[in-house]
Amino acid sequence: MRKKDFKDIGDGSGLYMEEARGQATRTQRPAQAVPAKPAAAPPEAKAPEYRHIGKPTRRIDGREVVTGRATYTQDVKLQGMLIGKILRSPHAAAEVVSIDLAPALALPGVLGAVRLPDSKVRYAGQQVAAVAAVDERTAEKALALIKVEYKTLPYVVDWEKARDTNAPQVRDGKPNVEKLNQYVRGDVEKGFAEADVVVERTYRTGFEVHHPTETHGSVAAWEGDHLVVYDSTQNIHGVRDGLARAMKVPAANVTVIKKYMGGGFGSKLGLNEQTVAAANLARETGRPVKILLSRRDNAVCVGYRPSSHQTYKVGAKKDGTLVAFSLLNYASGGVGAGDDVAEPVVDVYKCPNCKVEEFTVFTNTGASRATRAPGHTQGAFGLEGVMDELAAVLDMDPLELRKKNYSTRNLGDTGLPYSTKGLDKCYELGAKAIGWERRNRQPGGGDGAGTVRHGIGVATSIWFGAGVPGTLADIVLYPDMSVEVVCGTQDLGTGTRTLMAVVAAETLGLGPKDITVKLGNSDYPWAPLSGGSLTTPSVAPAVRDAALKAVDRLKAVAAARLKVAADDVVMGDRKFFAKSAPEKTVAFADVYRDLRRETVFHGERTGFPQNEYAFNTFGAHFAEVEVDVETGRVRVLKYVAAQDSGQIVNKLTAESQVVGGVTQGLSAGLFEERIMDDTTGTVVNPNLRDYKIATSLDIPEITPLFVDVFDPRINNLGVKGLGEPARVPSSAAVANAVYNAIGVHVREIPMTPKRVLEALKKKEAGS
Ligand code: MOS
């Protein structure tokens, strides 16, 4: 996911991602042979003792969600609200010759109809027109009455066919294959020449659809010249800005609201077409308009994870020291860009010579979108696969090979337990928890009853996650001792409300339930999009900053009551006391009352770690599987995910993130694949029956472990992101466990029984 992808949507969110990642775009910069020495951190920094931070806290809004009282976009009902529907092209490539809306508008109950931009159709499912009617049935009837004349054009949906020079051109006057990324450090040819062993392998990953529980949807209403939109979005501020541009109104006249959300996984980062359509129809009809996308739309129109076709060549010395790495990748993201998958190979291991070349292949399918850890999940699958295949050739323990080579770049001579040292801890704790010594010494040594083989595998995670400087949050103290924390972030379902309450409560000496949390409104203080694993490391430090300022004021007020100096005041259990005279106390309630009116404290997340690795997050995942060599079926038996995400804020929701990330990775690794039909140019499985997602029966016991590495340079709490790091290595860990079980690497995900059996057959044939 690069800046460009976001620019295409035009919502300005690319800027936030760029900030969030800081130097993370380093694969696109010239390599630095000798990185700068890191700034020294205070030696032996230790996280403070906390009462709530780092402990498990139940969601403060859990009751609303499980009782159905929480309002999602589809629950929004406004007076006079119309239902909008979008007409989509059945053709994968066509000129739109004409659109006649009149027959639709003539239908009683239809109040508005609009043509949607783009005279050229480039994928089946692309929007063409939209209607608004009094109810859903009427809107659907109206869609059928719109007359569209298409001139169909040749198309290509198969990305391998699209690479042919005589394949239909997806974009006018531009080739289907385009350079995506290149990176060089050292001299790979020299490196390979010096290697004792060279291994070359190709790995493929398929098209994975986000399929959040809640489909995309919007309700748009004009209040005079002010536009209010309820949107299922990961990015209320970005949607506000994009919508302002699209509707040609000032950003100050747009408010975007997102109360509760059923996930997004990257597919809701940008301004959506249905949001603009709803706003246009609302303007035309003078009534609020709701448009909800269908499950089918989710599979066809709002993105997926691009495929990859990665060829790695790795050279190593006999003792396992890596000397050269090269990667050639072809990625396909339909009419959008593919993902750059190089970050893992560039950054996880310290290999002096490294060369990357990546291409994107355009096809006539909907545009890809950022999907939970874009590029990294694909890259981890390939890189960690070839590391295991190299370990086998070297007759080395795959974990030892990783420990020998993981990058300590930029740790310099500080010797501090930061950065990639967290990864070392992950390897250690994870290996212990899974029982690494139980693995097969050589891949394929797995035994079991009858046709079943057991195996254990490991894979490494790297991601970003230090948060975005400039994130704002307010704390409001009331004389009746109520406390409000306000931030224009959004909760995707990950527990953002609770983390805000935890940080405020911790700092103010209260309980999480004492805090009223306000979020999900673009009129609130700015926060970045919720993506890139940057919500917690952006929002938590901003709340902390505001709350610390509030505490300062409370202490000053208490000091007046206690008749001591402000710096003599200490916060105790719901009271303040004087350090010099601990018997002098004043209750919180009295101090808050002395504020006399509500008082606002502004907080900001400031600073950003300049060290190349300090802002990265790490992890090591371990999977244990059984493979039936007769049926090709893979079952994951046990899974351990060790993560270094710095200070954990809420252990309960952090564990949920890890379990969710692992579940998604297992699902993608074993089952999920969007399939295109070459003869019609459409998605064959745009539903949840034919697109298989793991159920609870497919998911084993998952053990999340957090390593205790505290780096105060990251932000005022030392917190880093977690949502994506937990997804990065999970397909790879399962693939490596399968390899350990059956002795042949299934180099393509999803690892369907068919692919497992094909791999076994190839092994028998000795190729
Ligand atoms: Mo994430 S793919 O940045 O929601």
Image (cartoon, grey):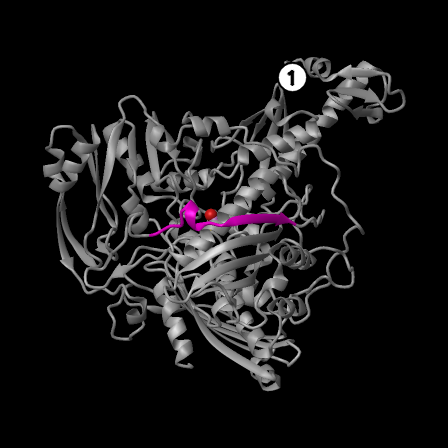
The amino acid type found where label 1 is placed reads: Met
Q: What residue sits 55% from the left and 46% below the top?
A: 534
Q: Residue at x 64, y 76 (%)?
A: 320
Answer left or right for 42 relative to 405: right
**Figure quadrant of residue 277:** top left
Residue 44, position as x, y percentages in the image: 80, 50
In magenta stretch: residue 614: no
- Quarter of the picture containing the C terminus is bottom left
Judge by depth and name the residue closer to the eye, 601 or 204. Answer: 204
> Is residue 113 in view?
yes
On screen, residue 141 above or below 576 = below
x, y (%) of residue 281?
Answer: 26, 34
Whether residue 14 is visible, yes or no, is no
Q: Is residue 397 above or below residue 620?
A: below
Please, what secondary structure does the residue beneath circle 1 have? loop
Q: Quadrant of residue 542?
A: top right
Residue 570 picture quarter: top right
- What's the magenta region? 692-706
Q: What residue is at 47 percent from the left and 60 percent from the top? A: 626
Which residue is most to the front?
A: 450
Residue at the far right: name it: 580
Q: Residue at x 50, y 43 (%)?
A: 530
Task: Name the foreground residue: 145 vs 222.
Answer: 145
User: Can you say whether 14 is above or below 488 in the image?
Assistant: below
Circle count:
1
Residue furthest out toward the bottom:
193
Query: How dense is the environment of label 1, judged by Cα within 10 Å: few (below 14), some, or many (20 and up)?
Result: some
Q: Position of residue 35 (x, y in %)?
A: 68, 66
The residue at which mark 1 appears reads as 481
Q: Position of residue 462 (x, y in %)?
A: 57, 58
